[in-house]
Amino acid sequence: MDMAMAKITENVPLAGKTTYQIGGPARFYAEPEREGEIIELYQYAAERGLAVFVLGNGSNLLVSDGGIDGLVINLSAKFVAINWGDGKTVSVLSGFLLDDLAAAAAERGLAGIEELSGIPGTVGGAVIMNAGAFDTEIARTLRSVRVLRVAGLTIENLPAPSLGLGYRTSVLKGSGDVILSAVFEFEPAADAGRPLSVREQILRKRNEKQPLNYPNCGSVFKRPAGNYAGTLIESCSLKNFKIGGAAISEKHANFIINTGNATAEDVRGVIRHAQEAVYEKSGFLLEPEVIFAGDFTKPLYTPEKS
Ligand SMILES: Cc1cc2nc3c(=O)[nH]c(=O)nc-3n(C[C@H](O)[C@H](O)[C@H](O)COP(=O)(O)OP(=O)(O)OC[C@H]3O[C@@H](n4cnc5c(N)ncnc54)[C@H](O)[C@@H]3O)c2cc1C
């Protein structure tokens, strides 16, 4: 039996492990390389009554200033491998970056994921959220996933249709279960050069429309039915609205940027303010897409019940 367990370190700062560059430390932290190590880490946490938080690339995450009181398992560091099967099928470990997968598929002339170019998350984070852009979602090419059920530490292979993949959601979201790996199947493009040119076009568009020169977490709010979060926020004249170091981007109102030294509480305050202003003006209650980890002093906005 392999007795080498993934190394566990204490009090590890998480800010640098998120695209927001915000947040306090993990009380315990590990970077597993193999499935067996992930299971051992869950056993370690269970024996000590520690909560576990699975970290991907931290690109859809606001970690609180106090950090995460538990064991943070970072999959984006070493749990990364890609295996091409029959030329259009690929199996990837969940810590592998989605954008690297999009690049690899496009370089092979394979279509189906090129529209997701530039999304800076891991495959695991993208599956949990059913990440999407430009009318394409992960669901389009995902065939199956290998999941660790944390309740009994058993592993199951689940076909994509059983995952309840919807707009930025899946049945696994919030379940605590861990995506270990995923199988995708792409289509050979009629014009083999097209996936790569679409990819390049999309990367350019993202750069034009998104404030990528500041740390951010992508779209902060989900798209409300029949409208756009950015439009609703802009109509409240909130572009450049700022609390501490956190500001609503001038370039795209559904982005809250870290202008330098923003705290998680600053970002949370801006989120709450935008929710309240939009609700009062238009009656839409914006629902955050960003995931909160750790404890925050202020709750999100809820309209007063009349
Ligand atoms: C500039 C920018 C642009 C973006 N554009 C888009 C976009 O166009 N479309 C879009 O959908 N998103 C977009 N995002 C948001 C984000 O990149 C995606 O939601 C991404 O899928 C998150 O993956 P992650 O690995 O960073 O997850 P993290 O932020 O690390 O984690 C998010 C959640 O997923 C959970 N999680 C992560 N990995 C696993 C796993 N293996 N098993 C179980 N749970 C897991 C975490 O516990 C957490 O709850 C953007 C973000 C940025 C910064």
Image (spheres, grey):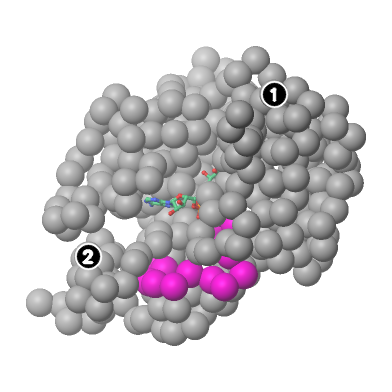
Query: Going by the picture, which residue comes out furthest to the front?
Result: 306
- Residue range corresponding to the magenta coloring: 58-73
- Residue 266 visible (yes or no): yes
Residue at image point 72% right, 38% down: 276
Q: Looking at the rendered structure, which numbered label has been put on residue 283?
A: 1
Which of the two residues, 221 or 43, is positioned nearer the viewer here? 221
Residue under label 2: 39
Viewport quadrant of the C terminus: top right
Percent across and percent down for residue 17 are 57, 66
Residue at image point 65% right, 15% down: 226
- 14 shown above or below 221: below
Which of the two residues, 88 or 69, is positioned nearer the viewer here? 69
Membership of 60 in magenta stretch: yes
From mark 2 to mark 1, how far is it between C-alphas?
45 Å
Count numbered badges in the picture: 2
Which comes before the other along the chain, label 2 or label 1? 2
Amino acid on which the number 2 mark rests in the picture: Ile
